[in-house]
Amino acid sequence: MLLPPLPSRTRSRSRVAVSVVAVSAMGFLAACGASDQDQQDQAEPQSQGTPGSAEGATEPGEPDREPEGSAASPEGNAEVHRPGALSEQEKLEVLLSSADLPVSPQGHSTYEDLSYFQESIAVEYTHYQDSFDETECSAVMDRINVDLVGEDPRSGLAHAYTLPAVEGSDQEYQPQIYVWVLSYDREVDTSSVWHYVHENCTGGQLASGTEEVEIEPFSVDDSAGLPAEGISMVIHRNGEPIDSPAAVRHSMTLDFGDNLVMLSAVGLDEEDFADLAAVQAHKLADYADRLDDDA
């Protein structure tokens, strides 16, 4: 699932204009996508349309086109065992936990009901098309969660973490991290979805007046041999990045056999997010290694 819209509190100082509210994550990556809740509610974040789950989803608008340059088959990485649908206990085991985070979270919510994903994440919104120029990119971003989640997930589990406010920041925004997994009865392949996003959104493809959202592909140097792909989003005004942690968002997916894992964050810099992504990838790879050992 993609990231949630900017909370109203972030607009108090630098006046992040209404158009920016449309920037719902995964990102992406990873959690919500249609609420304008206040910052004090972040201890128990409400999911909306975050980094969605994918299960061999088709490329929007061009289902028969062959994806190019996707990260579905990373070169130079050892092949990882592709597991079947994970049980609830296995999901808890392989997802990032509080102990994996750089600091202890101040808030943590867990969602286990599949209806949470179907009703809060796999929903097509119109935030981007309403707030930015109507382009193919804005249309793609409004439905990316639907395309990632795809059809008929069997089960899912999501964690939402709220971290302490960024030290030294004059804004009291608390970074948010979302991680979830959906399981299917078929192998997951999100490469075509991400290829379509990159093709239509890379660079400054979302703009409204003096505001622009810069979207760039996000790649993980150490994905432990797993197909990993995503995006980074930075909100600009008058050609400069907005000075707010909430204006920096990352989201990515890891295809893991019959499972889709999504990691998204608001307020983390690229290096910190990449470190978390590598930890998540290695937790999955370690689990796959144990499967091989037990085979």
Image (tube, grey):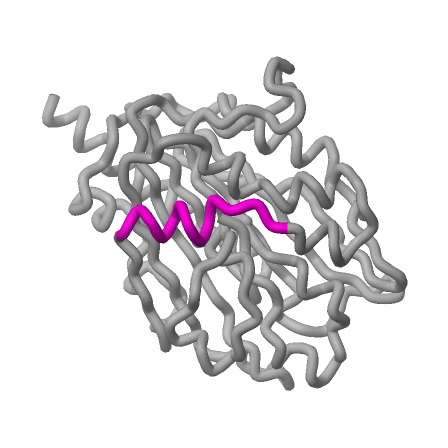
Residue 59: x percent and y percent?
59, 25
Q: Which one is nearer the viewer's eye here, 87 or 166?
A: 87
- Residue found at the far left of this picture: 294
Establish if 22 lies above or below 117: below
Residue 9 picture quarter:
bottom right
Q: Which one is nearer the viewer's eye here, 39 or 97?
A: 39
Q: Which one is nearer the viewer's eye here, 167 or 210?
A: 210
Residue, x 66% and y 25% (percent of image)?
A: 61
Residue, x 29% and y 61% (percent of image)?
A: 110
Report the magenta residues as a range.
Answer: 113-125
Establish if 267 lies above or below 149: below
Residue 116: x percent and y percent?
36, 53
| Magenta span includes 19 | no
Residue, x 44% and y 53% (percent of image)?
A: 120
Establish if 16 lies above or below 168: above
Q: Give the left or right position of residue 159, taking residue 50 as reference.
A: left
* Quarter that holds the C terminus: top left
Residue 5: x percent and y percent?
60, 63
Residue 157: x percent and y percent?
30, 49
Residue, x 34% and y 40% (percent of image)?
A: 182
Residue 84 picture quarter:
top left
